[in-house]
Image (spheres, coloured by chain):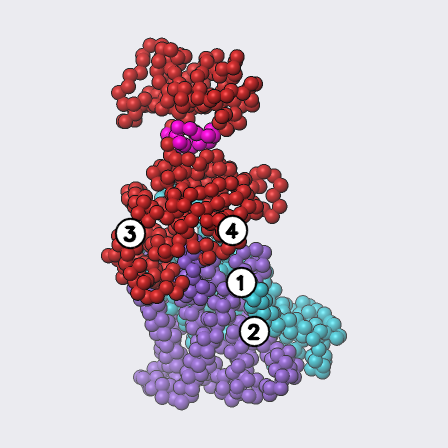
């Protein structure tokens, strides 16, 4: 029984790794080799694709742009979600339930629906092709998510903690920043992880709202695929590099990923 | 937890409301505005009432992408949910392998969606892709750029690859929360593995599974980037799902009126289905 | 129903135990009678849960054998040991009704429907659950859920032993004694062997026929509640059972008699050791000390009137001695002297009583 279980997990992980392995394999090949021969391992091992990306500003700027707006978005989302989640978890106020549900309906809005109006809105505001535009646009789905996750974590902290702090003479903000925020540090980590994740992987809005100055790496890749012929090696190398930040972030929150969603309420 | 009534709590919520409303209401109003007007350029608009809505709801094209979307979402739910549960059940409960499994499984979730599409493109291409080569090597004629069946199965397989881990992570979280005493009690009561699953694990996973199904429904219903990069909606229109069709109409043909009407219908469908599902699950909870 | 033999059981959670402290259970060699109610009593970490899990088969002991009625079950899985268990936190199958919960162990064993039905009703009646048979189990209060857990064990007629792992932890205080007396009553009517794990002496002493006191992985005494009170075999039993605990005072052997701070003490201990062993102590419960001019003088520090008895805290040459007197018994105001009742005064060496 245990052997068989082990096999299921291993096979699944193998299945997950296979396309990634192929991407890596391609990224170390020359375009000629990719198109010419079929091999499970690069015959003509090369770092040229990576060199090109790391030295050509049109490529590496894509990474800088992506990371920039993802970080801005994560900071904004978590910062504004913190007091809101606290309000939802501790207080009753006019329209609280409806508001919570309305926030969540925005998580259900297909980005395709918003692509064109977003373009017009941010152009009208003169924010087109800036990092802040993408960061703000991603707030549409990341803020509801962050509020949801944080509310779950906060509700599991007993109210007595707040009351004790007030009795000890803490002012609200001092209590909130000095005691409450450290208590739910794990929840903040999880919320930040999911904001980072959804902002990092989204492309439709990011692409619509940028042209040159703030173009995300993912969009740079689609351009390469069409204009610069079919430089598959380069594409594969760029793709491989987009996996790295994610892998890095997962490693740090590995013990909390599963918990994050489990604690949130529906 | 009993909550304190506090009208001032609104102050805490204002930043969130402002940011989300800015992103949600203004674009939504724009969409509503377009959906009831006709334009011939130069910012001249004419009132059209419900014309676009009727047109979209009657159009063969919308029906087709809608049915394709339902079929796709249905298929991936039927595959990903049971598969995700099965893998979560098979995963180790403790020890160093847990972290390794979690990290490796979460990896696909953090890859930009167009990279997922591109990755699967070069993975499945019949001439240079590993998967394409393997399937053709088995004697099956496979080319997802030309055959609808291949294109469909590749898209579904890609989604399974991309998102099953989310179901696994959630189910695993639900399973880890079950106290050992339940398993011991089941042993003592002589329950077999199926009974343990049916009467302990499944009921305890209900909440996380609700979240999983809801997220997978919403996200798969809105899917755009991955199939767009993988197949471009083709061959023909065979993998043109709702979002792809919508973007084609709005940005490709610049038919703003129909695109806006379709957007609203689309949004309402997602909302309605999510709401029905949520209400049903919650009613089951109360009984 | 079964007699349980624990044949030189030792257990360690470590792969290679070498230090004595590595053993969660140091060596238990006991035979437990059929149909008796046992309580495993001790503070947390004393090994009582380990011992329980060894009997239920959730843990296989590092050394030794477990026998049910002379059958070696050391390697028999839990399912085949025919045991029942009530856990610390109530375990019920949430999606089932109370009735389905009770029927579950029987259905799993393929018992026929009519028999299940009669049996379930019988047991439900016994536990006052008849009223709520058709209700969802998840909606019940903690004590109701604990009753369901117990009932799932009682419905089976093949049960060798029913085990309770601190079953009253989550029960409201005012319901605790109700459930406890229900358990006692059930034991008398059903007559099955029961093992009850607890750290609460009141629970153990009121429930059990025989109490097993565990301390740091060792069984220090097995006895009836009265034996534990009157003849503690170990200083731990003296401290842990009784409120307040037993007095233990340093002791010497002078000319073949025990003496505390120069005062000769008469004890029940028959054979005194020739020389003074390491850490020799004399032990006597506060209940077995009384004021008498024949004894040695003490200074009274404090008197607490606790209703049915009075607690007197005294000292003699810096050693504090507690005395329990009945309500209304007189406390001498001048030159108080005390005497230990020799029948209940014993000598202890290295913690163990000297016989």
Please give the chain letter of the residue carrying mark 2: B
Looking at the rendered structure, the secondary structure element under dot 1 is loop
Q: Which residue is mark 1?
A: B91
Chain A on-screen colour: cyan
* Residue B76 shows in the view: yes
Q: Which residue is mark 3?
A: C127
User: Which mark is nearer the camera, 2 or 3?
Assistant: 3
Please give the chain letter of the residue carrying mark 4: C
Disc 3 to disc 1, C-alpha distance:
40 Å
In the image, what residue occupies the spot 33% across and 59% down? C102
Disc 4 to disc 3, C-alpha distance:
33 Å
Q: Are marks 1 and 4 on the same chain?
A: no
Q: Are marks 2 and 1 on the same chain?
A: yes
Q: Are marks 2 and 3 on the same chain?
A: no
User: Which mark is nearer the camera, 4 or 3?
Assistant: 4
Viewer-side residue, C214 vs A158: C214
In the picture, the quarter occupied by the C terminus of chain B is bottom left
Magenta segment includes B76: no
């Amino acid at each position: 029984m245990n052997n068989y279980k082990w096999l299921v997990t291993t096979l699944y992980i193998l299945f997950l790794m296979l396309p990634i392995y192929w991407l890596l394999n391609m990224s170390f090949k020359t375009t000629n080799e990719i198109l010419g021969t079929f091999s499970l391992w690069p015959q003509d091992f090369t770092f040229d694709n990576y060199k090109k990306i790391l030295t050509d500003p049109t490529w590496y700027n894509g990474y800088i742009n992506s990371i920039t707006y993802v970080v801005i978005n994560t900071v904004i989302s978590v910062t504004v979600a913190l007091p809101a989640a606290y309000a939802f978890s501790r207080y009753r106020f006019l329209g609280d339930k409806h508001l919570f549900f309305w926030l969540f309906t925005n998580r259900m809005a297909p980005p395709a629906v918003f692509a064109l109006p977003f373009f017009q809105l941010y152009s009208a505001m003169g924010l087109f092709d800036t990092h802040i535009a993408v960061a703000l646009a991603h707030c549409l789905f990341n803020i509801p998510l962050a509020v949801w996750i944080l509310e779950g974590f906060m509700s599991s902290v007993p109210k007595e903690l707040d009351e004790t702090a007030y009795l000890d003479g803490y002012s609200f903000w001092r209590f909130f920043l000095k005691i409450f925020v450290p208590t739910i540090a794990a929840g903040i980590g999880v919320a930040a992880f999911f904001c980072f994740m959804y902002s990092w992987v989204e492309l439709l809005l990011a692409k619509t709202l940028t042209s040159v100055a703030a173009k995300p790496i993912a969009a740079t890749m689609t351009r390469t695929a069409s204009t610069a012929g079919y430089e598959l090696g380069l594409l594969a190398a760029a793709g491989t590099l987009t996996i790295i930040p994610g892998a890095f972030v997962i490693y740090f929150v590995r013990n909390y990923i599963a918990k994050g969603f489990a604690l949130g309420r529906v | 937890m009993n909550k304190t009534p506090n009208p001032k709590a609104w102050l805490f919520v204002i930043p969130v409301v402002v940011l989300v409303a800015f992103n949600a209401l203004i674009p939504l109003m724009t969409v509503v505005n377009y959906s009831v007007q006709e334009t011939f350029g130069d910012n001249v608009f004419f009132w059209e009432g419900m014309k676009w809505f009727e047109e979209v709801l009657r159009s063969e094209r919308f029906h087709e992408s809608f049915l394709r979307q339902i079929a796709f979402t249905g298929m991936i739910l039927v595959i990903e949910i049971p598969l995700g549960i099965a893998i979560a059940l098979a995963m180790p409960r403790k020890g160093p392998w847990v972290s390794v499994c979690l990290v490796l499984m979460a990896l696909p979730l953090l890859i930009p969606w167009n990279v997922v599409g591109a990755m699967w493109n070069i993975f499945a291409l019949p001439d240079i892709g590993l998967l394409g080569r393997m399937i053709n090597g088995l004697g099956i004629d496979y080319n997802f750029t030309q055959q609808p069946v291949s294109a469909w199965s590749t898209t579904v397989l890609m989604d399974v690859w991309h998102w099953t881990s989310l179901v696994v992570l959630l189910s695993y979280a639900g399973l880890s929360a079950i106290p050992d005493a339940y398993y011991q009690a089941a042993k003592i009561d002589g329950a077999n593995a199926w009974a343990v699953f049916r009467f302990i694990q499944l009921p305890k996973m209900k909440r996380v599974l609700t979240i999983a199904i809801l997220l997978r429904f919403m996200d798969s219903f809105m899917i755009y980037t991955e199939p767009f990069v993988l197949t471009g909606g083709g061959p023909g229109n065979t993998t043109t799902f709702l979002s792809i069709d919508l973007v084609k109409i709005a940005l490709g043909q610049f038919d703003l009126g129909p695109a806006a009407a379709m957007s609203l219908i689309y949004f309402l469908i997602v909302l309605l289905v999510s709401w029905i599902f949520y209400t049903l699950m919650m009613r089951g909870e109360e009984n | 129903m079964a007699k349980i033999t624990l044949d030189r059981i030792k257990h360690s959670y470590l792969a290679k135990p070498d230090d004595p402290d590595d053993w969660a259970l140091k060596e238990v060699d006991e035979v437990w009678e059929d149909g008796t109610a046992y309580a495993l009593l001790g503070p947390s970490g004393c090994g009582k849960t380990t011992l329980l899990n060894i009997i239920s088969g959730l843990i296989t002991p590092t050394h030794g054998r477990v026998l049910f009625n002379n059958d070696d079950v050391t390697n028999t899985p839990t399912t085949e040991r025919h045991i029942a268990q009530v856990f610390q936190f109530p375990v019920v199958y949430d999606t089932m009704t109370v009735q389905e919960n009770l029927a579950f162990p029987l259905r799993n064993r393929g018992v026929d429907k009519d028999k299940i039905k009669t049996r379930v009703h019988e047991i439900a009646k016994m536990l006052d659950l008849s009223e709520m048979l058709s209700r969802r189990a998840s909606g019940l209060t903690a004590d109701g859920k604990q009753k369901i857990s117990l009932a799932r064990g009682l419905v089976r007629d093949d049960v060798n032993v029913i085990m309770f792992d601190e079953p009253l932890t989550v029960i409201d205080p005012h319901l605790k004694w109700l459930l406890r007396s229900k358990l006692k009553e059930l034991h008398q009517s059903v007559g099955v062997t029961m093992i009850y794990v607890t750290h609460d002496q009141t629970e153990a002493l009121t429930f059990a026929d025989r109490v097993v006191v565990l301390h740091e992985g060792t069984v220090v005494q097995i006895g009836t509640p009265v034996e534990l009170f009157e003849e503690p075999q170990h200083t731990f039993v003296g401290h842990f059972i009784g409120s307040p605990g037993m007095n233990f005072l340093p002791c010497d052997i002078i000319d073949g008699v025990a003496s505390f701070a120069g005062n000769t003490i008469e004890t029940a201990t028959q054979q005194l050791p020739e020389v003074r062993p390491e850490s020799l102590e004399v032990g006597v419960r506060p209940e077995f000390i009384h004021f008498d001019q024949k004894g040695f003088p003490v200074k009274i520090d404090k008197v607490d009137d606790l209703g049915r008895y009075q607690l007197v805290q005294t000292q003699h040459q810096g050693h504090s001695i507690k005395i329990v007197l009945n309500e209304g018994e007189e406390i001498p105001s001048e030159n108080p002297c005390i005497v230990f009742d020799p029948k209940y005064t014993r000598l202890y060496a290295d913690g163990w009583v000297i016989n």
